[in-house]
Image (cartoon, helix red, strand yellow):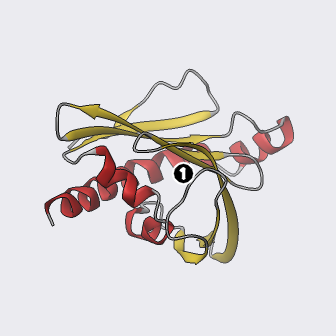
């Protein structure tokens, strides 16, 4: 198993990829079900879904219970990119995005690329993101999330 850093072409994106022995539809079903996000979260910040549809689509909103720096809070997200079985991204209130891109590799495997994208933030928000160490924290979170997503999708594909 290898989680590979991905070149995003921007210093304001953190990205990595993993190959999963499952078809895109199985992986996408996990990503589009917000109630499964705590199952795959490797950052340790996602505590549970508080509101939202059972299946995400473009424009859908969902709320998540989070915990960071010892403080619990709630955050709302909106799906801003969506291509069935290929791409989903949601944005937080500040404008940064979490993005998952799925690319087939052979007949039953998929390369999953997860990206934390803060390239749309203004200079003050970008400075705060960097000051609080989010690029490196999210790099570690992505490196832990991708294997959890792989394990969940491979288990779902065989059940």
Quadrant of residue 151 in the image?
bottom left
Residue lying at 46% horizontally and 53% vertically, measured from the top left: 141
Of 156 and 121, nearer the camera is 156
Of 37 and 56, nearer the camera is 56
> Does 141 sit above or below residue 36?
above
Element marked by disc 1: helix
> Does 45 sit above or below residue 29?
below
Q: State the image coordinates of residue 148 (x, y, percent, origin top left).
A: 32, 59
Residue lying at 53% horizontally and 37% vertically, measured from the top left: 14
Q: Is residue 70 left or right of residue 43?
A: right
> Does 157 sit above or below residue 15?
below
Tally the numbered discs. 1
- Residue 75 seen by the camera: yes
> Does 105 sit above or below residue 48?
above
Of 156 and 10, nearer the camera is 156
Of 125 and 53, nearer the camera is 53
Q: Is residue 4 left or right of residue 78?
A: left
Residue lying at 77% horizontally and 51% vertically, measured from the top left: 94
Q: State the image coordinates of residue 9 (x, y, percent, origin top left).
A: 56, 20
Q: Is residue 96 left or right of residue 27?
A: right
Q: Residues within 10 Å of mark 1 (few under 14, many from 20)?
A: few
Residue lying at 22% horizontally and 48% vertically, measured from the top left: 22
The residue at which mark 1 appears reads as 137
Q: State the image coordinates of residue 89 (x, y, percent, origin top left).
A: 57, 46
Name the image quarter holding the C terminus: bottom left
Q: State the image coordinates of residue 12 (x, y, percent, origin top left).
A: 64, 32
Q: Is residue 31 left or right of residue 138?
A: left
Quadrant of residue 3 in the image?
top left
- Residue 100 seen by the camera: no
Name the image quarter holding the N terminus: top left
Which residue reaches farthest left? 158
């Amino acid at each position: 198993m290898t989680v590979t850093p991905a070149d995003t072409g921007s210093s304001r994106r953190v990205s990595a990829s993993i190959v999963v022995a499952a078809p895109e539809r199985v992986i996408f079903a996990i990503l589009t079900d917000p109630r499964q996000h705590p199952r795959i979260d490797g950052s340790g910040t996602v505590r549970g879904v508080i509101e939202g549809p059972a299946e995400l689509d473009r424009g859908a909103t969902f709320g998540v219970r989070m915990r960071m720096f010892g403080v619990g809070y709630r955050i709302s997200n909106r799906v801003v990119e969506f291509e069935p079985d290929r791409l989903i991204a949601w944005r937080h209130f500040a404008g940064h995005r979490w993005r998952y891109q799925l690319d087939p590799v052979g007949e039953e495997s998929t390369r999953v690329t997860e990206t934390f994208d803060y390239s749309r933030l203004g200079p003050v928000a970008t400075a705060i993101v960097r000051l609080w160490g989010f690029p490196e924290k999210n790099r570690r979170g992505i490196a832990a999330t991708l294997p959890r997503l792989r394990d969940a999708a491979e288990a779902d594909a065989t059940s």
